[in-house]
Image: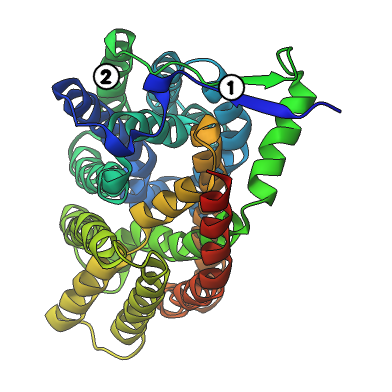
Amino acid sequence: MASVIFSQDAAQTSASNQAVSTSGWLTFGLVFLLMMVDYIDRQVIVSMFPALKAEFGWTDTQLGALSSVVALTVSLGALPIAVLVDRWSRTRSIMIMGTVWSAATMACGLATGYLQLFLARLTVGLGEAGYGPAGSALLASRFPARMHGFILGAFQAAGGIGSIIGVVLGGYITARWGWRAAFGVVGVPGLILALMFWFVPDYKTFQVNHGSQRPSLGSLVRAIWQALRQAPTALLVGLGGALHLAFVANMLTWLPSFYTRVHQLPQERAGAMTAMTVLAFSVGVIVWGRAIDRLGAAHRTRRLQAMAVLSLVCAALMAVAFGAMPVGRAQIAMIVLGGFFMGCTVGTVIAIVLDVIHPAFRATSVAFVALLGNLGMAIGPLAVGMVSDRFGLQAGLTLAPIFSVLAAAAFVACVRVYRADLQRLAAAQ
């Protein structure tokens, strides 16, 4: 069987030596804003949980599922959609995806029961499924490799900022005009931004040939599998990132309810308190992405070691906050500090995967990370919701840091295979 061959123009080679153009920064700005809207639409529902519980009497497991279904759909859809993105167009794909999830978000406000709201949220996830991979691939082509950790971390930080806005807006609008109005308001910006991608230049699609012919879908899938199989780093670092994101998702999902039930705060103030932690997380994504890039400049494996240590610090801070501290300002301060450490893995995990995968599969490799990460984000809130129904929400949040401890173990295990994958790529050049 003839092997699959990657071909590309000289201009489309690695961005490691490119200077960053003005159009590159403009593209970053637009991709960043749409990522922010992505998470506004994803997270706006968590501030509605008290209102939905009061109106419909749904359990915490049901409420958690409304959050988890988006992450689960993103996880399952990310890889197949990213295959199409890599072979077709990043910008046109983003335009379509943004339109779908924004329309689905507005449709959530029309739901009259649990099944309708669940299906609308599932459609939100379907629309969002390929955006992270497509946006990351587009940014990776615009910026040099030495900046990937920082740029991709900043891109992911937009999700944290969007989560803040979603939680605050959701609480504010729900308190004044109801939860249906909140869905309608947050859906509009995504439609506008999505249409703007019609004017954004794409990078030329890398051609994948099977001998002298274009490959069949089966050959292409086998080539993708071969690229991932030859790079066990992608599996291990992706697993570590997914476990840590399971913990992050718990904080993003359940903190508003924690402040409402445990601290007895009104809905709007609970949203504001949650926003402080999410803001700390977003700042942490950028700060730790930059710091870990610099730490790993000479020895790349130090990036994995740094993520392991920081994940353990995050777990310790949050376990103490929820499990040992009394209700009050000191507890809130500890949660915010833990939120800053929560951002330690986001950009770096993606940058490490891009280190070991051929550029022809940029979006697909990021989608593989997204698949694992969103599985983690789906499992985390649902698991805490189930524990909460049985033992209380504080007990669920006290146990949640276990996910970050397991993440640290995966990062440590990845050090050796990452070194081997880097040596393999160096030998192949």
Which residue is more in the foreground, 304 or 347?
Answer: 304
Q: Residue at x 34, y 46 (%)?
A: 48
Q: Position of residue 258 (x, y in %)?
A: 32, 67
84 relative to 288 in the view: left or right: right
Question: Going by the image, does 369 lie left or right of 201?
Answer: right
Residue 91 occupies quadrant: top left
| Residue 98 seen anywhere in this rendered image of the structure | no
Give the residue at x 19% y 74%. Answer: 332
Figure disc tally: 2
Query: At which x and y percent is residue 221?
Result: 72, 31
Looking at the picture, does residue 63 appear above or below residue 39?
A: below
Q: For the point 20% across and 40% down, which residue is it?
A: 169
Q: Residue furthest bottom?
A: 324
| Element carrying mark 2 | helix
Marks 1 and 2, how far apart at CA = 21 Å
Question: From the viewer's perspective, is residue 418 above or below residue 165?
Answer: below
Amino acid at dot 1: Leu
Q: Nearer the viewer, residue 242 or 138?
A: 138
Quadrant the N terminus occupies: top right
Numbered tag placed on residue 84 in the rendering: 1
Q: Return the x and y of residue 399 as percentages of the image width and height.
A: 47, 79
| Residue named by callout 2 | 193
Please, is residue 153 above or below residue 187 in the view?
A: below
